Amino acid sequence: MVAERGKWSGSRSRSVLTLNLILNAMLLPIFGLQGAVIATLCAHGTVMLGIGIAMAWCGFKFDLTMIAISLLPASLMLGPAVAIASVCTVIFISPQIKTWLVEDLSPIAAKFSRPATLWS
C-alpha cells in the first residue's frame, strides 16, 4: 500500500534547512560566499544521501552512471574546467548516456543535414 507521508517531508525539510543555516553560520565568516556554497552543497548532499538510503531500502539497484551523475554538482566547486571534464568523463564511461545522446541528437542532426544534390 502506498500512502503519502506529508509530515515526514516537512520534518526532512526543516532538518535540512536547520543544517544549512548552522553550516552557513559557521562557514560564511571564514570562507565568505564560497562557505555558503559549501554549506548548501552539504545540506543538499545530506538530502541526496537520505534519498539514496530510502531507494536502497526499497530495492533500487545503484550503478556507476547514477552515482557519477549524482556527484556532478560537487565538481562545480572545483571550477568550470573540472566540471566540464567531469561531464565528459561521465558521458565517456556511461553506455546509457551515450545511447540517450544519440537518440536525442539524431533528429537534430537529420534536420541540419544537407540533402544530396546533383552538383555535389
Image (cartoon, rainbow, N blue to C red):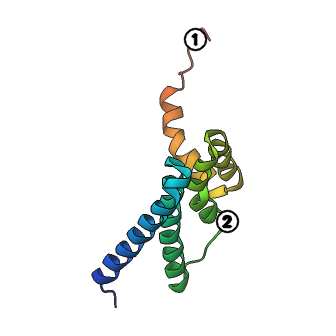
Please tell me which residue is depicted at 54% across the width and 80% down the height of the picture.
53
Looking at the image, is mark 1 or mark 2 nearer the viewer?
Answer: 2
Q: Secondary structure at mark 1?
A: loop
- Disc 2: CA contacts within 10 A as few (<14), some (14-19) or many (>=20): few
**What residue is shown at x 67% (from left), y 56% (from top)?**
94
For the residue pair 16 and 7, the one nearer the viewer reads as 16
Residue under the image location 60 percent in, 8 percent down: 119
- The residue that label 2 is drawn on is 64
Q: Give the x, y percent position of residue 100.
A: 56, 51
Q: Look at the image and tell me whether residue 22 can be seen.
A: yes
Residue farthest to the front, as pictured: 29
Task: Tell me residue 50's x, y (percent).
Answer: 50, 76
Residue of label 1:
118
Secondary structure category for the residue under label 2: helix
Name the side, left or right, on which 67 lies relative to 33.
Answer: right
The reply to whether the C-beta atoms of the residues labelled 1 and 2 are less than 8 Å apart is no
Give coordinates of residue 86: x percent, y percent: 66, 49
Quadrant including the C terminus: top right
Q: CA distance from mark 1 to mark 2?
A: 49 Å
Question: Disc 1 or 2, which lies upstream in sequence?
Answer: 2
Amino acid identity at mark 1: Leu
> Would residue 4 be seen by someone viewing this image from the given angle?
no
Instruction: Give the quadrant of the N terminus.
Output: bottom left
Q: Nearer the viewer, residue 54 or 18?
A: 18
- Residue 107: image x %, image y %? 49, 38
Q: Residue at x 53, y 40 (%)?
A: 105
Question: Would you say 87 lies left or right of 16 here?
Answer: right
Residue 6 in the figure: left or right of residue 45? left
